[in-house]
Image (cartoon, helix red, strand yellow):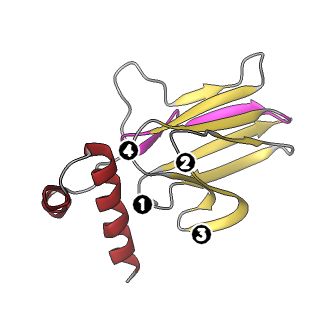
Amino acid sequence: MKRLGYVIAIMLCVACASGGDANTTTATVATTAAPAATTAPGASTTGAASGGGEVMVSANDFSFSPATVTISVGDSVTWTLAEGAHTTSSGTAPDLDGLWDQALTADEPFTFTFEEAGTYEYFCRFHPDFMTGTVTVEP
């Protein structure tokens, strides 16, 4: 049953991204496996807060970019939606840890301020098997 939910979520993502006909989208999903997380040429897989105390992470192409960020206590991470349907959900997939769980929209980025040092894992609830990231917060 859980797998069916993932298939439906992927179909919705593809439909949102393509803006196409639902029948075409269903056929595409049925014949195309979900891609592994990749990094575009020239893109960074890591990021760090610089001066302003904020790092931007984009949810795009079934990955978070950058996937790994390092910040200081009191800094923030802002997730933006580039395309598709994604969430930023704290924890180790598929288990939420309750710090944050936010659906991303094109209209409104989501920002979380980290008040304690540590390593924080997060994932997309729609794509938990391959869409993950880590925030390292240093003292």
Disc 1 + disc 4, Cβ < 8 Å: no
Quarter of the image for residue 60 reads top left
- Give the crowd class for mark 3: few <14, some 14-19, many >=20 residues within 10 Å: few
Q: Which residue is mark 4?
A: 37
Q: Which residue is mark 3?
A: 95
Disc 3 + disc 1, Cβ < 8 Å: no
Q: Which mark is first along the chain, 2 or 4?
A: 4
Q: Which mark is first along the chain, 2 or 1?
A: 2
**Left or right of 52, for residue 59:** left
At label 1, the amino acid type is Asp
- Nearer to the camera, 96 or 103: 103
Q: Nearer the viewer, mark 2 or mark 3?
A: 2
- Give the crowd class for mark 1: few <14, some 14-19, many >=20 residues within 10 Å: some
Q: Which residue is mark 2?
A: 104
Residue drawn at (13%, 61%) of the image: 27
Q: Which mark is first along the chain, 3 or 4?
A: 4
Residues at marks 3 and 1, CA–CA distance in whole angstroms: 12 Å
Tell me if residue 79 comes above or below residue 128 in the rendering: above
Q: Nearer the viewer, mark 1 or mark 2?
A: 2
Residues at marks 4 and 2, CA–CA distance in whole angstroms: 18 Å
Residues at marks 1 and 2, CA–CA distance in whole angstroms: 18 Å
As helix, strand or loop, the secondary structure at mark 1 comes to: loop
Q: Which residue is mark 1?
A: 129
What is the number of the mark on residue 1? none
At label 4, the amino acid type is Ala
Q: Which mark is first along the chain, 3 or 2?
A: 3
